Image (cartoon, grey):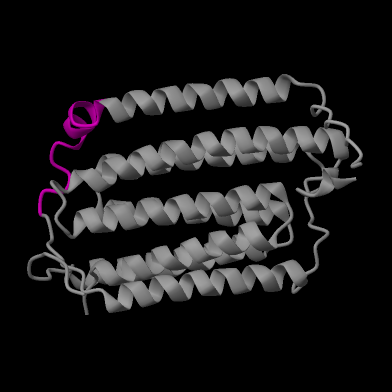
Amino acid sequence: MPLIGALPQPITSAPLVILIYAVLVLMVASALASVWFRSTLYALGAFAATMVLVALLYLTIAPFLLFAVQLLVFTTVSAALLVGLLRQTAGLDSTQEPFSREWIIGAAVAAALLALLVVVEATTSWPVRASANAGAGFGATLTNTYVVGLAVLVVILASAALGSGLLLAATTLPAPRPRVPRR
Amino acid sequence: MNAGLEPILTASAALLAVGAFAIVARRSALLMLIGTQFMFMAACLAFVAFARFGLGAVNATSGAAVAIFAGATAVAELAVGLAMAALIYREHRSMAVDADRG
């Protein structure tokens, strides 16, 4: 089904195209590796690599600010949080065997999801219109057009910080409610 | 040879599928949280790609703005999820999400 749009103008510069394809392939490969590794430490490393590769992709197609935020804030904070948890826990190796029942169910779900997305992507005629000034006024757009979104984001982050702090301060899990026997 | 919307959307779909696989197949809370991060990133990539290549966006920065909001929300979700995982570990000495089934 064709959507409303203009003439397609993809990126044609050869080095940039090669870089984009290489980053895309490496990104998916490192994401797969992070799910595949039995060692949590290796999985964490592959996850951080995926985040860095996403940032690199943003560098080619998005405003520079998004690249900087992805690399310096999202990647660093996520990795620091995960490493912090790893330091609190001892079990670095998974006890789960590959190709177990959960793996087969998970692979089936992932394959169905991927097939659905590929079918949608292949059957839709995406209108493409390259925008030359992708980075122009991004900061101003964030603080003017999306000021409410920014405010909501601050509230969400503050709530998350407070909630995780309270959870970590708790000594034990809350006790489950006792079961009431059926009559 | 060129790079447009399709390769990025394909990679985004693959990333989403990998995230879904991690959530369904792995029992470790940490790996499941990594899976949710992949799914967030896949959505952000799609937003940015659509904004970069047009598709009726008001301006090219809209997708990047949504990506920033979604990324920050993902980090917030990760923080709360990891705190819960730490609490479960403290109680059961295991990162498996079904550790407290008894």
Is residue A36 found left or right of A24 in the rendered image? right
Query: Which residue is more in the foreground, B5 or A17?
Result: B5
- Residue B26 occupies which quadrant of the picture? bottom right
Residue at figure coordinates x 83%, y 32% from the top left? A176
- Residue A69 appears in view: no
Residue at figure coordinates x 18%, y 60% from the top left? B53
* Residue A4 in picture, x, y percent from top left: 12, 64
Residue at figure coordinates x 31%, y 30% from the top left? A149
B56 above or below A149? below
Residue at figure coordinates x 79%, y 39% from the top left? A89
- Residue A136 occupies which quadrant of the picture? top left
Query: Which residue is more in the foreground, B23 or A52?
Result: B23
- Residue A7 occupies which quadrant of the picture? bottom left
* Residue A166 in picture, x, y percent from top left: 66, 20
Where does the C terminus of chain A fall, quadrant-wise?
A: top right
B60 above or below B88? below
- Residue A97 appears in view: yes
On whether residue A90 falls in the magenta region, the answer is no
Is residue A71 found left or right of A16 in the rendered image? right
On whether residue A138 falls in the magenta region, the answer is yes
B38 above or below B75? below
Q: How many marks?
A: 0
Query: Which residue is more in the foreground, A163 or A39?
Result: A163
Is residue B98 found left or right of A111 in the rendered image? right
* Residue B55 in picture, x, y percent from top left: 17, 59
* Residue A121 in picture, x, y percent from top left: 32, 72
Segment colored magenta = A132-147
Residue furthest front in the image: A183
